[in-house]
């Protein structure tokens, strides 16, 4: 398990889910942008992706938008689950 913000276990409370498993660059990030564009600031989003470049792309998007990656968890089979707080 990878925890971006702290050494504590990730918060698994309810969040808006976006599944981008099976999509390759740039489709995972485009799906994330499309599905979050009308969500309010502070919304918790769980984003699942198995795209090898997805982590770098998502981090770049968050730097540009001000979204915060709270944690990243390895799910197995190359899938990463991200918890993002929207700016």
Image (spheres, grey):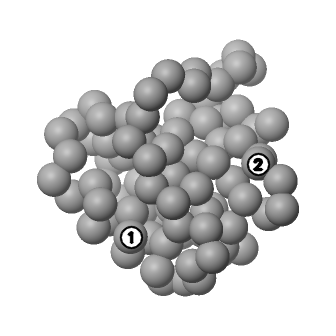
Is 46 placed left or right of 22 in the picture?
left
Residue under label 2: 75
Residue nearest the viewer, comparing 41 with 65? 41
Asked whether, in this view, residue 26 is left or right of residue 40, the answer is: right
Which mark is first along the chain, 1 or 2?
1
Does any portion of residue 41 appear in the rendered image? yes
The disc placed on residue 31 is 1
Give the left or right position of residue 65, taking residue 60 as reference.
Answer: left
| Residue shown at the point (69%, 54%) measured from the top left | 80
Which quarter of the image is occupied by the N terminus?
top right
**41 shown above or below 28:** above
Question: Who's the residue at 53% across and 34% down the image?
Answer: 70
Residue 10 position (above or below residue 65): above
Q: Secondary structure at mark 1?
A: helix
Depth order, front residue of 12/52: 12
Q: Secondary structure at mark 2?
A: strand
Mark 1 burial class by Cα count in 10 Å: few <14, some 14-19, many 20+ = some
Graded by Cα atoms within 10 Å as few (under 14), some (14 to 19) or many (20 or more), the crowding at tag 2 reads few
x, y percent for residue 5: 61, 29
């Amino acid at each position: 398990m990878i925890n971006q913000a702290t050494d504590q276990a990730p918060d698994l409370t309810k969040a808006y889910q976006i599944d981008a498993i099976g999509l390759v660059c740039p489709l995972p990030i485009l799906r994330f942008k499309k599905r979050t564009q009308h969500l309010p600031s502070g919304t918790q989003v769980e984003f699942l992706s198995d795209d090898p470049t997805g982590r770098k792309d998502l981090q770049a998007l968050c730097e540009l938008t001000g979204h915060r990656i709270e944690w990243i968890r390895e799910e197995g089979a190359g899938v990463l689950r991200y918890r993002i707080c929207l700016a």
